[in-house]
Amino acid sequence: MEPVLARSVRLADDGVHVLDRRKFPFEHTWVRCATAADVAKAVEDMVTQSSGPYFAVLWGMVLAAREARGLPRAEARAHLERAGRMFVATRRTNNALRKAVAAVLAGVDAADDVEAGALAGAVAGDERYRARSRALGTHTARLLPDDGAVLTHCWADLYLTETVSAARAAGKHVRFFCTETRPYLQGARLTAETLAEMGVDTTLVTDGTGAAVLAAGEVDVLLTAADRVTMDGHVVNKVGTLGLAVAATAFEVPFLAMVQAPDRLAPTAADVPIEFRPGEEVLRTLGRRTASDRVRGWYPAFDVTPPRFVTTVVTDRGAYAPDRLHDYYNGEEVHD
């Protein structure tokens, strides 16, 4: 059975419906976004995370096309471009939003009707992302032990569920340790819950416990997604990944970073904007204040792991050493 979170964004006649991952699994609440601007607000407010924003933007661009109904083609196309810029600005570190916008615009440019083209582009983008995630999961599963434990951080979404499915199909028995992932607790609420839903032996640890788990020899692999991987091998992911990667290196545990493709538009880490979210967010947990008014918070949402702490970057085309990522693009071009 497909995990609940695998289909957490839906297009409907009355808008885009987004499962509120801030409340999952305690509540299954859907947020209705009637306009493209509503979708952007939902993404910015963390209603959905990981691959969720990609799908939200696909369908949000369809809403933008609906909003442009009746306009001359050039004006409708310009409206979609403005909506695309709005979406990309919501979460700048992950380049999946740019890809979602590009998928819809490609559909528009290939069709006579703007709205029909936008829908076709969104459907194609949805199918392509899921297919590439399956391929990525298959390649990742091959690198996991036949019977061992994995430490993961934050919520890798389809990358993780496809990896688990592929490992199971290969007859592997893999256990997981999940960090809680402050301040939104994606690891506790999303990762651990989904793995348990899939029947995986799952253990939750606090964010500060990862190094101790690695030092104790409890895990065989550190495995995370990557919001972006630069062409020179830097892994950009949820803040906290860097510390775990350093600890994994110290205790000789391989670190595998999953991404569909390295980003040709980011030659180095300097080319990736790091999102800083309001410091107020780290002063609360699940809506409850956890620090007094006398302190302030600081919250870079992502950190950058240098390639010397990365063992392997796994993509939808296979596994690469971080200094060999240009090999990904040898031969035929891919829609990245």
Image: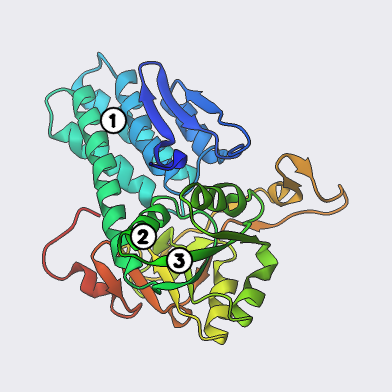
The residue located at (40%, 74%) in the rendering is 145
Image coordinates for residue 222, horizontal then vertical, percent: 49, 72
Q: Quadrant of the C terminus?
A: bottom left
Secondary structure of the residue carrying tag 3 is strand
Residue 310 in view (yes/no) = yes
Residue nearer the viewer, 26 or 57 = 26
Foreground label between 3 and 1: 3
Q: Are marks 1 and 2 in contact (CB under 8 Å)?
A: no
The amino acid on which the numbered mark 2 sits, given as a three-letter code, is: Arg
Label 1 sits on residue: 78
- The residue closer to the viewer here, 150 or 97, is 150
Question: Is residue 59 shown above or below 268?
Answer: above
The percent coordinates of residue 207 (x first, y second) are 66, 63
Residue at which label 2 appears: 168
Question: How many discs mark residues in the rendered view?
Answer: 3
Q: Which mark is residue 174?
A: 3
Give me the C-alpha separation between circle 3 and circle 1. 49 Å
Residue 264 visible in the current orientation: no
- Mark 3 and mark 1 lie on one chain; the one further toward the N terminus is 1
